[in-house]
Image: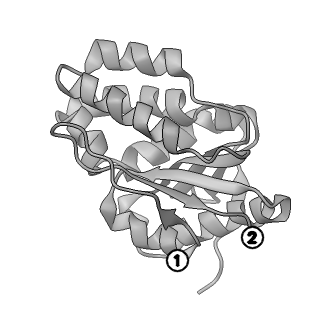
């Protein structure tokens, strides 16, 4: 099979690239636990994408397949999430006890990041109509090549246990499983420098 063309997202394409993640995560256990009602998910998940991984667009670290059927958002070393946007979103859209549980999960995840400078994979998603065609693996290879050249760590939190094996095939190792209250599992993973 021919390697898909992967490119950096232009800033003017941020909304289109966010839509890829909206489609990809529409059946994700953690995201649908946060917003189980479809209209709420469609309304609020794009704000979550911008708050959690949106700074990737500012740092040329957002990638898409040529047809926008897959994409990834990475935060470079030293660049964090937009915590203000995330806290406001959770306060306004996620009822208790889920709000406290997701905030506790995020706090735990923060303690598990590598202490060394690292790249944070915030989102890797493929439109459900194109899953299983190697697009996720191609997106990972595209981003990991320069990370390896820099000899940096890579880190992620998988919100779907079904995706862990994909990440393991690309050198990520499970740190532990994180559950708080009634939450589905979140699985932080790290990839040492190569």
Q: Quadrant of residue 101?
A: top left
Is residue 22 placed above or below 107 in the rendered structure?
A: below
Q: Residues within 10 Å of mark 2 (few under 14, many from 20)?
A: few
Checking the image for residue 194, the label placed there is 2
Q: Quadrant of residue 92?
A: top left
Return the x and y of residue 144 as percentages of the image width and height: 70, 63
Q: Are marks 2 and 1 in contact (CB under 8 Å)?
A: no
Return the x and y of residue 73 as percentages of the image width and height: 60, 45
Q: Which residue is mark 1?
A: 169
- Which quarter of the rendering shows the C terminus? bottom right
Residue at (23, 30) in percent of width and height: 39
Query: Is residue 102 found left or right of 157 in the rendered image?
Result: left
Residue at (26, 23) in percent of width and height: 99
- Which quarter of the rendering shows the N terminus? bottom right
What's the coloring here? one colour
Return the x and y of residue 151 as percentages of the image width and height: 80, 61
Return the x and y of residue 58 as percentages of the image width and height: 73, 31
CA separation, marks 2 and 1?
Answer: 14 Å
Checking the image for residue 100, the label placed there is none
Q: Earlier in the sequence, mark 2 or mark 1?
A: 1
Q: Is residue 174 visible?
A: yes
Give the camera-side residue of 53 and 117.
117
Q: Is residue 131 visible?
A: no
Residue at (38, 48) in percent of width and height: 23
Secondary structure, mark 2, is: loop
Secondary structure, mark 1, is: helix
Query: Is residue 94 found left or right of 59 in the rendered image?
Result: left
Q: Residues within 10 Å of mark 1 (few under 14, many from 20)?
A: few
> How many numbered marks appear?
2
Query: Is residue 3 found left or right of 88 in the rendered image?
Result: right
């Amino acid at each position: 099979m021919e390697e898909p063309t992967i490119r950096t997202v232009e800033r003017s394409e941020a909304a289109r690239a966010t839509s890829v993640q909206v489609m990809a995560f529409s059946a994700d256990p953690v995201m649908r636990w946060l917003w189980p009602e479809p209209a709420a998910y469609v309304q609020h998940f794009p704000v979550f994408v911008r708050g959690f991984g949106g700074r990737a667009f500012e740092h040329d670290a957002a990638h898409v397949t040529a047809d926008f059927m897959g994409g990834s958002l990475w935060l470079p070393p030293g660049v964090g999430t937009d915590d203000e946007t995330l806290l406001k979103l959770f306060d306004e859209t996620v009822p208790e006890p889920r709000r406290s549980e997701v905030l506790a999960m995020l706090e735990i995840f923060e303690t598990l990041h590598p202490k060394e400078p690292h790249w944070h994979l915030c989102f890797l998603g493929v439109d459900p109509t194109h899953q299983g065609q190697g697009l996720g693996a191609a997106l990972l290879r595209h981003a990991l090549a320069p990370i390896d050249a820099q000899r940096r760590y890579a880190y992620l939190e998988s919100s779907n246990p079904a995706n862990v094996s994909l990440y393991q095939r690309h050198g990520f190792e499970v740190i532990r499983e994180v559950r708080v209250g009634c939450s589905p599992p979140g699985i932080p993973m790290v990839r040492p420098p190569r």
